Image (tube, coloured by chain):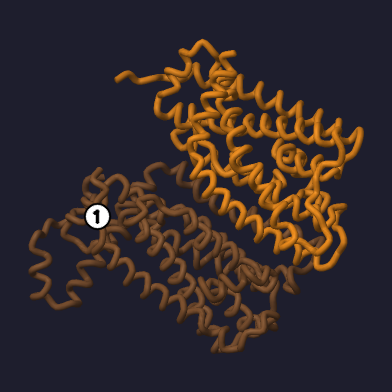
Chain colours: A orange, B brown
Amino acid sequence: MLLYAIARQSFRRHLTYRAAAAAGLLTNFFFGIVRVAVLTALYDGRPEAAGITLPAAITFTALSQAVIGPLAAFSWFDVMRSVHSGEIAGDLLRPIGYLTYWLAHDFGRALTQFLLRGVPMLIGYVLLFPWIAPADTHFVWPQGGAMWTATGVCAVLAWLISFGWRFLSNLSAFWSPDARGIIRFVFSLSWFASGFLFPLRYFPDWLQQLCALTPFAYTVNAITEVYLGLQRGGDVVRLLAIQAAWAVALLAAGALVLRAGVRRLVILGG
Amino acid sequence: MMSTMPHLPSHPTARSSSSLRPPLADLHHHLGLLVRLVGAQVRSQLQYRVSFTMDVVSSFLMFGFEFGALAALFVRFETLGGWTLGEVAFMGGLTAVSFKTMDMLFSGFDPPAFGEHVRKGTFDAILLRPAPLTLQVLGSRFVLMRVGAIAEGVAVFALALWLVDVHWTAAKLTFLPLVVIGQLAFFAALFVIGSTVTFWTVDSIEAMNILTYGGHELNQYPAHIYPLGLRRFFTYVVPTLFLAYYPTLYLLDKPDPTGMPSWVRFIGPVIGLGAFAGATAIWHIGIRHYRSTGT
């Protein structure tokens, strides 16, 4: 119940920034359209590449722009700030674990972002599809109830993994006053390896395998794979299982590192 | 540290005495002041060495990863709108060097950062100081970590030179720096206009990001791949495409699928410097109409 209350508060707090979300949406949409033009030119009349048809590729650009908000794909320094400012002292006194608190908080944030930026982005693409895609093609949706459910589960797991590495990288603030640079570095790595810029399938095999070693590949790219139906049946289940394993591993690592960090934490009074 | 701190001369009579001094001495004084302000910024940012290094490395990698992802696609797709990887890298590197250098030099005019001055009322303090306003804004912020992104732009351009056999002539070699300066001036103009707008709107407007960062993105790829509406807007309303795409057609001897007359390949630098002059004029109008938010 407490977690629910925190998530709800966070949801309502983020909901107040509607104008900012609408403005950000416009920029995301612009970059999405540029991405569509680049992919269309790369396809150059090919009906499909690496198993992805052109309408599916265009749908991917919508997905990639839609997850920026919910997965905080560009930056997230909240935990770092709480450590550096000393606010963490108050947070640690709460009758709820620090990690759990932030998890609930981030859930509320992600949900607002999904509603304010994710959903409108997809709707915008559906409406503009006739102008940005080849004639007689359609925006791609998951095929059937099972795939919708799988996509939903996959998206939630992707958010957990994303929270996991964001939280973990933010914990570097316990050891370093320079955490911002470290976190930025992790984010720039995530852009490439998460399949946010382009679906990993387009890459040469060795590069795909390299990306698959990181947790990032199980965020945006996993959503793309399941949503577009590039994985089927047992492969979907396997993908979701790997996602769950990464989520558990990252959260466990977060809890361990947090404990070590808190042990060396010194809060100055005043 | 104390010995290296800039000693800013206090000179309440600077304005009245300027008419007595030759203009060149004035310019020299102003440049000296700018160097000191920027120098102070640079030194303060170098205090946190690890942080600074990480920031430079990640800003180098950020663009590197973006370009790397695109480059990896050429293995499968081979060309982008008829351009090879080297040709795309040529234009992308040129644009990155121009834009990121501008982003560093004109950090003070970055609309969200500048809007902060207007919102918090600290711009009032700038107005009161006995030094030229524009110079103070330029010296108020200097994001040195952009050198990482600039270096990446240079690396991408170097890669392009290795991949593409450019038929260099004396004319092309003269034109190349003008393209960089023109594009730098053009995006600087957009920064200045975006900042001036905050005099009225207080908050920086998001639409400006589409023109600045969006324009930078547009100038990374051959423009003929864009939908007609988008291309027309960025040709006739905001002439971004003249700054990188058309000059690159000339430098690389590429055909023009957009069917523009051939002289448009050379007007980029003129447009860039013209936009900068226009933006300066708008900036001065803005200053005259500035009203403090009262905070």
Q: Quadrant of residue B135?
A: bottom left
Between B49 and B41, the one lying in front of the other is B41
Q: Is residue B164 above or below residue B121?
A: below
Question: Is A115 displayed left or right of B126 in the figure?
Answer: right
Tell me the quadrant of the picture where the C terminus of chain A can be found.
Answer: top left
Task: Please tell me which residue is depicted at 40% across the width and 42% down the height of the picture.
Answer: B48
Dot 1: what SS?
Answer: loop
Q: Quadrant of residue B227?
A: bottom right
Task: Please tell me which residue is depicted at 57% across the width and 60% down the height of the picture.
Answer: B152
Q: Which residue is mark 1?
A: B291
Amino acid type of the residue that numbered disc 1 sits on in the rendered structure: Arg
Between A117 and B211, the one lying in front of the other is A117
Residue at the front extreme of this rendering? A127
Task: Please tell me which residue is depicted at 45% across the width and 22% down the height of the picture.
Answer: A88
Between B255 and A83, the one lying in front of the other is B255
Question: Is A49 displayed left or right of A112 in the figure?
Answer: right
Q: Residues within 10 Å of mark 1 (few under 14, many from 20)?
A: few
Q: Quadrant of residue B142?
A: bottom left
Residue B221: x %, y % from top left:
65, 67
Is residue B50 visible to the viewer in this orientation of the structure?
yes
Tell me the quadrant of the picture where the N terminus of chain A can be found.
Answer: top right
Residue B215: x %, y % from top left:
54, 64
Residue B175: x %, y % from top left:
52, 83
Residue A160: x %, y % from top left:
67, 29
Task: Please tell me which residue is depicted at 85% across the width and 34% down the height of the picture.
Answer: A145
- Chain bearing tag 1 is B
